[in-house]
Image (cartoon, rainbow, N blue to C red):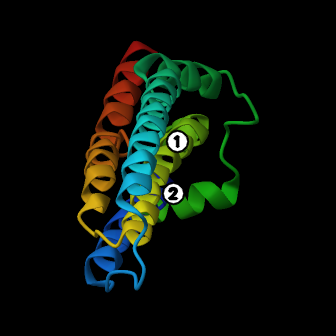
Amino acid sequence: MLILWIVWAALTSTVIVCGAVAWFMPPGAHPMDPEKVRNLFIFMSIFSGVLLTAALVIRRRYCRVTAIQKALREFADGRTSLTPTQEEQKDAKAFGDSPAEIAVARAIFNGCVISWALAEAVAIHGFGISHMSGDRRMYLSFALPALIFLIWARPPAALIRDEIARFEAGH
């Protein structure tokens, strides 16, 4: 579970750091033509909307309760791809994670990371247009939706623990 939190924190912090850089960066010496900025802003807004939609679909597809339940069933059946190694179990124990939590985190890892990366890309697009236009406020139009998504889509630790408890109660 810890690895999910580390990756999530890294991607989320990038959005925040880009915001700080955009805010304190002096406007470009030769900002783009306002017509080009408007057209680029419209294009990037549409493209960013598509990216956030894809992030939402991926998140809902690969990180939902049924995916967690499936991972728990496979873990209980002894699937070697989900079973943590002895070293992973030792490391996880130090952080309070159970072998089942490691298995579930491993199963949903790709879906979580891809959805977070797509949301981060939206903020990076805003950073680029903010820099090219010389208007640092443009960053907010992209960063806020990305940050809201990242906060909403944080690692589902409570959900995973609830599903593990339900699963263990049923077995």
Whether tag 2 and tag 1 are in contact, CB under 8 A, the answer is yes
Numbered disc 1: secondary structure: helix
Horizontally, is 130 left or right of 108 in the view? left
Rounded to the nearest angstrom, the CA distance separating label 2 from label 1 is 8 Å
Residue topped by disc 2: 3
Q: Residue at x 53, y 35 (%)?
A: 104
Residue topped by disc 1: 105
Question: In this orientation, does residue 97 appear?
Answer: no
Horizontally, is 110 left or right of 35 in the view? right
Residue 73 rendering spot, x and y as whole percentages: 58, 19
Mark 2 residue type? Ile
Numbered disc 2: secondary structure: helix
Residue 58 rendering spot, x and y as whole percentages: 52, 28
Q: Nearer the viewer, residue 29 or 149?
A: 29
Q: Residue at x 25, y 57 (%)?
A: 140
Question: In this orientation, does residue 154 appear?
Answer: yes
Question: Number of marks in the image?
Answer: 2
Residue 55 rendering spot, x and y as whole percentages: 47, 34
Residue 44 rendering spot, x and y as whole percentages: 45, 45
Q: Nearer the viewer, residue 112 or 150?
A: 150
Q: Residue at x 56, y 42 (%)?
A: 114
Judge whether 150 appears above or below 15 on screen.
above
Q: Residue at x 39, y 34 (%)?
A: 160
User: Residue lying farthest right?
Assistant: 80
Mark 1 residue type? Ala
Q: Nearer the viewer, residue 131 or 111?
A: 131
- Nearer the N terminus, badge 2 or badge 1? 2
